[in-house]
Amino acid sequence: MRDIFDAELHQLGEDLAAMSGRVEQAITNAGIALLTADLALAESVIADDLAIDAIERDLDERCVLLLAQQQPVATDLRIVVSALRMSASLERMGDLARHIAQVARGRYPRHAVPQALSGTFAEMHDAAVRVARRTTTLLNSREIQLAESIEQDDDLLDELHEDTFAALLGGSWAGTTQETVDVTLLGRYYERFGDHGVSVARRVTYLVTGVGRPELDRTAG
């Protein structure tokens, strides 16, 4: 019975990593679609989000069954509960990538990001892709030193998010109302994407080291 339970826990880990890989592809393609006004790529991100949602539902159902049937305690309980939390964070990251793609699609054939902020959003795209890529690697390898890099990129996303506000509130902003709304939303989507990546990284670190406790309030929204 223990061997079966251990195999189920191992499979949860593999499926979380696979889900993260899909999120990594989603944020990569969403950013490219945004920066290049690629309609087909934006639509593919939107459609593929259904697969991420399906993985989350399957993971959550299996976690609930494990809790009900195995009644795990101590480390095993932390693993199952953490899997539930991480799947929710990854699903939200997929949603945020979809939101970015939807903005890109909604402004096609124009670019959603004004030229004055294209450099800022290119940097946000690069940082978000690094967060996603390192999250996938962390889930696969448990190389907890990656967690610090994820937090550093999240800090960069926070700074770039603040840069978008500075641009919008500066006296030189000449964007339309729609551009103002788009920039505000896009900056928020990228900023939240980083926060969810940090949440996953902290949970993995806690599982591996047993040190510290992951923050739960970062992932609201």
Image (cartoon, rainbow, N blue to C red):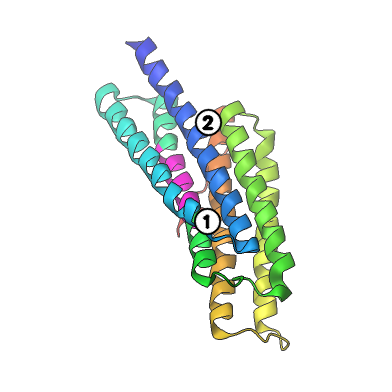
With respect to residue 172, does 101 lie above or below?
A: above
Q: Position of residue 196 (x, y in %)?
A: 53, 50
Asked if labels 1 and 2 touch by Cβ distance under 8 angstroms, the answer is no
- Quarter residue 71 falls in: top left
User: Residue 57 placed where, x, y %?
Assistant: 33, 40
Residues in magenta, as a range: 84-96
Disc 1 marks which residue? Answer: 40
- Determine if the magenta segment contains residue 69: no
Q: Residues within 10 Å of mark 1 (few under 14, many from 20)?
A: few
Between the C-alphas of marks 2 and 1, the distance is 40 Å
Compared with 155, 118 (above or below) is below
Camera-side residue of 148 and 181: 181
Is residue 216 among the parts visible in the rendering? Answer: no
Indicate whether 95 appears above or below 90.
Answer: below
| Magenta part, dominant SS | helix
Q: Residue at x 74, y 66 (%)?
A: 119
Magenta region includes residue 86? yes
Left/right of residue 13 with respect to residue 84 in the rendered view: right
Q: Quadrant of the N terminus?
A: top left
The quarter of the rendered structure image containing the C terminus is bottom left
Asked whether residue 1 appears in the rendered view, the answer is yes
* Foreground pick, 101 / 147: 101
Going by the numbered disc 2, the residue's amino acid type is: Leu
Specify the quadrant of the image occupied by residue 186.
bottom right
For image coordinates 48% across by 50% down, the residue present is 94
- Residue occupying the point 45% across, 57% down: 220
Q: Which residue does the numbered mark 2 point to in the structure image?
A: 207
